[in-house]
Image (cartoon, grey):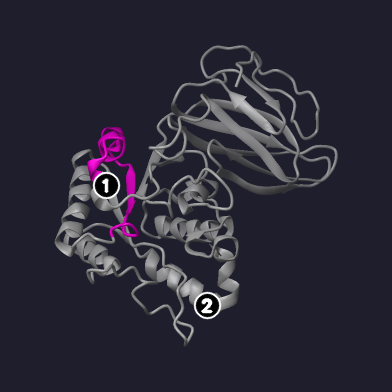
């Protein structure tokens, strides 16, 4: 995308000009931006940035913000006619901008203005100071999926966080604990980026189909030790369930609960390692099982890609959003992020 020379510009959906931000000095907006066709582009290098956005206009409006590789950054926000509201969030800009083994993507920061009646009144991007970063290590059920109808829960998690905490999603499709540790684009790249206090959430199991229990356990322990050596906070996450019902409407079977062909019960091993190594545990297997069973055979189809692709492993935007909410709740309950940096609702 071409580089532009003004800092705050028209909201594309309204085609209304906005005043330029004050010129520069300390704390001035980072890079240059222009909004066109619903996208605001900021010419900034990789890093972590605070985004302050003003919403509203003459008419009632409802605006959401996404960015980079289909990340949800701000949930749809309604503003009454004639009023303005300000929202702020922190975003991670990296290369590649989506999956670590995927294409580089567009340089800089791209924010997409959406919603049922979008109204952007102002936007400002500045380098983040002292932001905490949540690192995600995982597979295709977690990653920033590049195209519809797929979505990973890590792609939806940023919308639940306010300014001061960003999500650095280094989950990658097709990865097991073996391949994640062995690929230099993955663990060897992530580990040096971890700073003291950063939570690092690890959800790897779906692709450990041929990994024996001793190797799987050892790989999880290697990841935990590596995070701690950097001063980070490891958090083990059991995998989301597959939508695979028994005749009685339960998910109590090996396919749904991630028991591999060697008989390795992945959630059980994750729980065991968390207990043995005194690591916080997010039991997403139990939480997603409860949710899917409560919805039942038919309603739960909307959480996965059952209708679109006969896929009962990968989640839709709806499913990923609900699962990200479960993760958000666990982050708060376990005091892994400050309560004031989390959006509720």
In magenta stretch: residue 187: yes
Q: Which quadrant is the C terminus positioned in?
A: bottom right
In magenta stretch: residue 270: no
Query: To which quarter of the image does residue 305 belong?
Result: bottom right
Q: How many marks?
A: 2
Q: Residues within 10 Å of mark 2 (few under 14, many from 20)?
A: few
Q: Is residue 248 left or right of residue 274?
A: right
Q: Position of residue 324 (x, y in %)?
A: 49, 56
Contact (Cβ within 8 Å) of mark 1 with mark 2: no
Residue at point 33%, 74% (across, down): 254
Q: Is residue 187 left or right of residue 54?
A: left
Q: Residues within 10 Å of mark 1 (few under 14, many from 20)?
A: some
Query: To which quarter of the image does residue 172 belong?
Result: top left
Residue in front for this viewpoint, 37 or 64: 37
Range shown magenta:
181-208
Q: Is residue 37 left or right of residue 269?
A: right
Q: Is residue 177 left or right of residue 150?
A: left
In the rendered image, the vertical position of residue 21 relative to residue 267, given as above or below: above
Give the residue at mark 1: 179
Q: Position of residue 285 (x, y in %)?
A: 38, 67
Along the polypeptide, which appears first: circle 1 or circle 2?
1
Q: Nearer the viewer, mark 1 or mark 2?
A: 1
Give the residue at mark 2: 294
Q: Position of residue 128 (x, y in %)?
A: 46, 29
Residue at point 55%, 47% (across, down): 159
Element assignment for label 1: helix
In the rendered image, the vertical position of residue 9 relative to residue 165, given as above or below: above
Q: Which quadrant is the N terminus positioned in?
A: top right
Q: Which residue extends farthest bottom?
A: 248
In the rendered image, the vertical position of residue 10 relative to residue 182, given as above or below: above
């Amino acid at each position: 995308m071409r580089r532009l020379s003004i800092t705050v510009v028209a909201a594309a959906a309204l085609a209304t000009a906005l005043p330029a931000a004050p010129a520069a000095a300390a704390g001035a907006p980072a890079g240059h931006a222009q909004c066109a066709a619903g996208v605001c582009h900021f010419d900034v290098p990789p890093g972590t940035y605070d985004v302050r956005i003003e919403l509203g206009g003459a008419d009632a409006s409802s605006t959401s913000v996404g960015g980079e590789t289909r990340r949800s950054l701000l949930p749809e926000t309604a503003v009454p006619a004639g009023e303005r509201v300000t929202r702020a969030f922190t975003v991670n800009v990296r290369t590649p901008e989506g999956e670590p083994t995927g294409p580089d993507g567009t340089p800089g920061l791209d924010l997409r203005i959406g919603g049922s009646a979008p109204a952007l009144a102002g936007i400002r991007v500045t380098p983040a100071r002292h932001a905490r970063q949540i690192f995600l290590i995982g597979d295709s059920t977690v990653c920033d999926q590049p195209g519809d109808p797929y979505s990973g829960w890590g792609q939806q998690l940023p919308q639940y966080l306010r300014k001061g905490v960003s999500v650095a999603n280094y989950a990658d499709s097709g990865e097991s604990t073996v391949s994640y540790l062995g690929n230099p684009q993955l663990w060897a790249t992530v580990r040096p980026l971890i700073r003291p206090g950063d939570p690092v959430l690890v959800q790897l199991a779906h692709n450990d189909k041929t990994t024996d229990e001793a190797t799987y356990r050892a790989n999880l322990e290697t990841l935990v030790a590596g995070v701690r050596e950097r001063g980070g906070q490891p958090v083990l996450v059991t995998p989301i369930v597959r939508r695979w019902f028994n005749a009685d409407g339960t998910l109590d079977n090996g396919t749904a609960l991630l028991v591999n062909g060697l008989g390795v019960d992945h959630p059980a091993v994750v729980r065991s390692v968390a207990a043995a190594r005194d690591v916080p545990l997010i039991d997403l297997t139990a939480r997603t099982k409860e949710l899917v069973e409560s919805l039942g055979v038919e309603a739960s189809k909307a959480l996965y890609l059952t209708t679109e692709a006969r896929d009962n492993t990968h989640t839709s935007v709806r499913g990923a959003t609900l699962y990200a909410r479960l993760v958000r709740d666990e982050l708060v309950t376990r005091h892994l992020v400050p309560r004031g940096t989390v959006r509720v609702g």
